[in-house]
Image: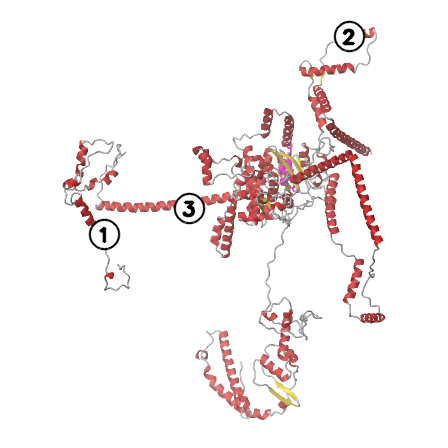
Amino acid sequence: MQKKYKKGASVNYTSRNQALRKLQLTLADFRRLCILKGIYPVEPKNRRKANRGRLANKTYYLAKDIRFLTHEPIIDKFRHLKSYLRRVTKAKARNEKSREETLRNNRPFYKLDHVVRERYPSFADALRDLDDCLTLIFLFANFPLLKKLYEPRLRLCRRLSVEFLHYVIASGSIKKCFISVKGYYIQVEIRGEIITWIVPHKLGHKNPADVDFKIMATFLEFYTTLLGFVNFKLYSDLGLIYPPKLTFSATTSLSTLCSEDEFSDEFLASLGLPIMKKADANPVDQVEVDQEAAQLLGNTEGDEENRRKEEETKTIQKLFSKCKFFISREIPREMFAFVIRACGGNVSWDKTMCPGATYDVNDESITHQLVDRPKLNDMIVNRAYIQPQWVFDSINARKLLPVDSYLPGSVLPPHLSPFVEEKEGDYVPPERFGQRQPDHDVEEEITKQVPSINLVENNAYLNGNLKRKRKDEEETPVPAKPTTKEQRKQAMRVESGQVQNINVPNIVKRKADEEKRLLEMTIPKKQKRLYDKIKFSQKKKRQEVEKLTRKRANHENRAKQDTTIDKKK
Amino acid sequence: MGRKTAKHVPRNQKKYWRKISTQDIEDRLEDVRVQEMTGGRRADQPDHVLYHIDNELPLGAKSPSAEETEYTAPILRSTGKKRQQLDLNNLNTYKILQPHSSVLPPAVDARPTKNPSSKRTKRLVETQEIVETRRAATKKYQTAIKQRSEAFEKTALDKAGKIELDDPHVSQGYDLWNMRDEKKEKVRSAVGSDMASYMEQIYQTYDWKVPKHITKKPTKLPAIETPLPGTSYNPTFDDHQGLLQKAVEVELEKERKELKLLRNLPKPLTQSAAEPIKQSYLKEMSAGIFDDDIENEQANDKNSFFGLNSVSIGKPVTVDTKTVAQRNKEKLRKIKDAEAKAAKEKRIQDNKFFRLKSIRKEITKESLEQQARDKKRKIEYENREKFGTKKFGRYKFEDADLDLNLSEDITGNLRTMKAEGNLLHDRFKSLQKRNIIESRIRAKPTKTKVKRYEKRSVREVGHRLNHPGVHIPHGVQYKTPHNLPDEYADHPLYPPIRPKYPPGSWGSMDPKKAWMHFELGEKHYRHLKSVKERLTIMAYQNMICYYDKLDVEQINSKLIWMLTGRPRSPRSLPFYKHITQTHVTDELPKFYEQMDVESLLNYVKPILIDRILTDEYAQKDDIPLEDMYDKGDYKVSSIMNEKKLKIDQQRTTNTLTKMIRTIINVLAEHKPHLRQALVSIY
């Protein structure tokens, strides 16, 4: 007979205390190890079975995971660290200064390289998990130096975050940005992976009481290692020099805000200047590669989508290429400098605000000046003074919006979230994405551009269609048949032949419609009902949208009239 | 060598003799015997009978040439030839060292060898040695310098590297995902994959197999949830209202849960419901205190007098018996009921047969419903598995509040915007929500336990001993106040709380000090009944000078206390007055008025004058010689003055002592007690 608790859940799960005993670690060390290795607790389906018939509230882990952890070399390092701490405290208590120093210089440390490799077998995996990593690192990069935080790690965070931002600028992969009350949401697309992260507002920092700092610091430890490797890989794939270097060497004449050895770092961190590329670089354009692969595989459906996407990226990359910005002092400089540079713009700021300013306020070529104060005293004529929201809205709209409603002191139009995605057929208010033209308009434009094709040059496939079409034409437009001979005579006439113009897209569309109708007919009765339901709901939605658009148009017309009347008065 | 025989064996016996083995002699004899039997003694026989030269070649060897046979000739030494002298210059050991290659060495040193014993070579060698040591020293010095500079450079570089990298423990200078273990690959190419894997196992250098699920996420929830449009710093009205609505819903849900909890708890009593309980409580507690109870009792007594003291409450129990007819009737009715019931059941069952179709319908309907329910449950379960937050351990995850700006906080301007929420907190909660870490509640810092013990002095206070917490060690008898009851007394037994200051006016004295003085007074003075006793004690306690007895005189039926000496603590006269309950008299006692001072003075005066004069005369020689001849040129005036002052002072004291002594001596003729007086002038 099988003994109880020798098989199944009671063996597959290990409680936390059991795991501690097995690994001979303290709870704090175990927590750290689990976070570093990516071992998460599990909830057994049946707690009673997992705990030998008892129903205690325990934290469980998979026994396999714990067995996996036993092989981890970091555990040994933890033990070294423990004894190191003991030695240091002893030396300190005995007031043995030199011994303490030697101990401190030989502090044991562990590397997480293998763990990163283990948890992210491919680079794409690492990119997929970058959301958390970036948010935490940007958060800690903006932290003040607290006593409970390891200071070099904070500086590392700062460095890594700057490096990543530089990569985004160099690759032009920004997609969306949004100012929320929580922070700046930024979305980029790197190698087809969408990465979103939050950058906190640079306001006063307050320590939340119920957050375990130790745990967050451990996450940070792992994420710094991860982002370091990711940055290296991204840089080297794009043909950039890593660690990033500016294209020129900074000199003391540029700024008096920092000392000479801090220059390169400070100028890098200001994000205002481009970074160096490798001399023999031929970066791999991932999009092109993807397209080629798609063509080879015969995947033409995704082709159009890809082309559209690529075009969009190109527009974003060149959005501000003709603009020259100047950021006033009251604006969070770093974020705006990054966003503008990521879209190909030039940016500068007051020399006293931050090092890395490239031109002055009085520069004639400045096109836009970001201002966030109600009143300005001296303004220069040939530039637009705008509130900072314009930058974010323009990026989300993928075009330069008119600056009229963003003038300083004016009430701004609402800042809409680009993360709200309308489904097909939803009502899109014209404010969204700055009056982005609806899809059908775009289609019309395309149809206009397509030149009409000569009948003779067309292939047989189109001919077939044409014949049917001609029949239709014959049937419909003729009002009455000629009855009398004279009339017939009059009607009988030979005219010079004309090249008939046909609209190819129309034909294609009709063909598609027909096919669709035929398909609809083949749907079995049971599913037909569902299909009808869906169709009905879509129709209702369309009606709703039409109603809303009509309402809106009316409202706007009325508003226009009102304004004209006011003007007349 | 010790003997093997035991010590106690007597030495005159044969037993004590030394035992020697004769085995070798026996063997020899035996051998000889055998030799004689087999053809005579070997020693007597010639060599050629015993030995023969083995000329046969070993198997497969060539027959030796003539030279070799010649060469091998010396081996036959047994023929009596003299042994050749050893050629020391031609030893085999040296031969081995000779170059045996047919190829000549590249160069041969043609220089003549030096005679090692000559003076010149010796000198040369010495100089060589000196040069070498010097060279070694310089080399050592140079390498030391080089190493030092290298080390310095290295540390500097390390430091620079540290500054550059911020964290030296983080290495990020290589492509992690494109890395190849070159060492391993080399081994693999050299020995083949099987052998390589075996070696990896031996040296434990193989990569551990990583469980597949480690790369999977515990939930499908995104790390960064898409922001709601209402959280924009400048949202549209509708979006913001939507966000507020969401927040309100969350709050309502919380409230609903709280209410549910409250409903399930036992209700607290309302004011009106608690009133009767309060009254009855009062009544119960005050039972037997007031007189009206006695009146009631008296009334009760009266009632009992009338015979109304019934014990039972409620109706009296009466016993009815049923008749036989009644029992029969009941039985019949029971039977009839059972029959009717059975008939009804049968009818229903029969009818069901005709209802087969509808029953089948019902069953199918039920099963369909069941299926739908199962499906729904399954979907819910899957959703929970994918998106739900699991419960690890004791605490359930509680979602953070929504971060939102209230309507009045929205300024529509980036500069004046009000930021909400803490990103760190948000991250922490997100990790918990995504089942990455368990939700915990911050533990309160544990207080270190304070060991409490009672001082001996406190322990010895008697009435605290009755306190249940006090431990009395076995065998020690403490005095307990006999009047204390066993359990609870009517009034508390704690020592009374004393006022801040003891009775009397104490000014701004420290209360503790005041109490100390008071207690001292109580202890030393209050319990003494007579004033004399008190004064005596006080004199002993507080006077610098003390006497064996105090002078007390009764003058005009009043006791006069002669207090001599100073009190130890200044300004304590009121205290003494209070303690001793005495007062200080203003005038001298009458006794002094009657004294004849004039005659005494006349008697003493000439003696005193005489005395002083003799003193003056005697002390004149005291002036030092230098001072006598001082012209004031080289002496500092201040030093002079000081010296003079000192001399003056000494003279006065001398004179005064002598005067007082004289007076006492003179007066002691009539009053002998004066001889006991102590005199001190300082």
- Subunit ID for the residue under disc 2: A
Spatial separation of the CA atoms under disc 2 and disc 3: 113 Å
Helix, strand, or loop for circle 2?
loop
Instruction: Point out the stretch of residues depicted in magenta.
Output: A320-342
Residue B306 occupies quadrant: bottom right
- Is residue B409 toward the left or the right of residue A343 in the image? right
Above or below for B595 versus B192: below
- Subunit ID for the residue under disc 3: B
Tag 2 residue:
A493
Question: Horizontal and vertical percent for residue B235?
Answer: 72, 39
- Subunit ID for the residue under disc 1: B
Tag 3 residue:
B148
* Residue B182 lies in the magenta stretch: no
Above or below for A19 versus B452: above
From the image, state whether disc 1 or disc 2 is nearer to you: 1
* Residue A329 lies in the magenta stretch: yes
Label 2 neighbourhood size at 10 Å, few (<14), some (14-19), many (20+)? few
Q: Nearer the viewer, residue B421 or B324?
A: B324
Spatial separation of the CA atoms under disc 1 and disc 3: 79 Å
Q: What amino acid type should be assigned to the residue bearing mark 1?
A: Gln
